[in-house]
Amino acid sequence: MGEGPDTQTHASAPPRVLLIDDEPALLDLYQDSLAPLGYQLDTADDGEEAAHLLSSKRYDVVVSDIQMPGMTGLDLLKAVRSTNLDVPVILVTGNPSTETAIRAIELGALRYLTKPFSPADLRRVVAYAACVNKMASAKREALKLMTGLEGFASDRAGLEASFERALATVSMHYQPIVSWSQRKVFGYEALARTNDVSLSTPLGLIEAAERLGRLVHLGRHLRRVVAATIDLIPSDTNVFVNVHPRDLEDDDLLSPTSPLAVNAKRIVLEITERASLDAYPEVPGRLATLKGLGYRIAIDDVGAGHAGLATFTKLEPQIAKLDMALIRGVDSNPTKQRVIRSMTELCRDLGVLVISEGVETAGERDALLDAGSDFLQGYLFGRPAARLLDPTW
Ligand code: G
Ligand code: MN
């Protein structure tokens, strides 16, 4: 959304409505229906003119015909959603079809009006749209007030637009994982960062990709970004790459010619315990293929998931990463110490290397060393960074 003086809505100001139709007679009719209610009305007789108005002015409601020469109402809606996630759009059509109705809803149209409709119908739907628009602004304001964050787009086209923006700006930051006893870097975890305010963290990106059905696309893109930056990391050092269980079904990941494959021997694929593997029955076989290519497997976020032991038996990981919630305050929590000690011992018996994540204080570090965990990752040693930084010891 723009930042100009024109973007401010005043609760008291009459809603601004943009009316778009290629039939001048209809535009007149719309204006006659709405003007007496005090709306500020603008009109456009094609999609291009409307798009131009929408990029220069703020509207509270848009009413657009679908079938127009040139840019259609659906194209216009898509264009609107790439910059404005809130403005309610009412689409109007003379010959309704299920496909356009579905597409309109997917793109985040608020309502779909079929011609002919009465002035009262139009007034009702525009009043409703203006109200929804005020609510959306109030919600965004509330969220920003409470969290300092811009909200998540609530419609498909808006989410698609932020997702595309996020993908275009994604970069990898690398965080060291150290062996304390050897005072040596064991590896770096690649962590995705973006410039999109609403999708700046991997969790936000993944959630958006899930909602859009684009997890595989996201996974491929992220792995390509890792491959493109892997030369930052010394060739004898491990690189930890997060993958979603869904990525394991992607032949691109399993291909010997995929971008990461040449480096497979130093790559550890992290699979989170937070997601259930139940939906992915082929995981064990796929993992065997990956191990055959030289990759190692880590279970991520151990202790945070509800997955019981299934992840260990299904993934047969070489590495387990203890979730930071378990690490936080471990120095003053004997129960956490006991749990970590027994997990570390069990992992040793299973031949699984343990890494403790999210270590922030020297007290936590010492308690972990005492509990038998020597491989550590966290802000205490180094934050994720776009350049490789030497860890602080
Ligand atoms: O789910 P996964 O373990 O991959 O997530 C790692 C996340 O934890 C990253 O986003 C990273 O920035 C963050 N992180 C790494 N070290 C620390 C830490 O010491 N404290 C906190 N609070 N977060 C950390
Ligand atoms: Mn991870």
Image (spheres, rainbow, N blue to C red):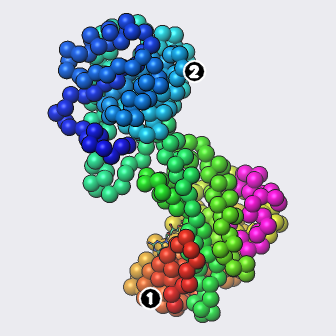
Residue 58 place in picture, x, y as percent: 32, 34
Q: Which quarter of the figure has residue 111?
A: top left
> Is 289 in front, or is 346?
289
Part of the protein shown in magenta = 247-270
Q: Secondary structure at mark 1?
A: helix
Q: Secondary structure at mark 2?
A: helix
- Residue 128 visible in image: no
239 falls in the magenta region: no
Left or right of 56 in this view: 204: right
Residue 344 place in picture, x, y as percent: 60, 82
**Residue that mark 2 sits on:** 99
Of all residues, the one furthest to the left in this rendering is 12
Q: Nearer the viewer, mark 1 or mark 2?
A: 2
> Is 346 in front, or is 285?
285
**Residue that mark 1 sits on:** 362
Look at 27% across and 30% down and name the residue there: 131
Look at 29% across and 40% down and name the residue there: 7
- Residue 180 visible in image: yes
> Is 335 in front, or is 231?
231
Left or right of 73 in this view: 35: left
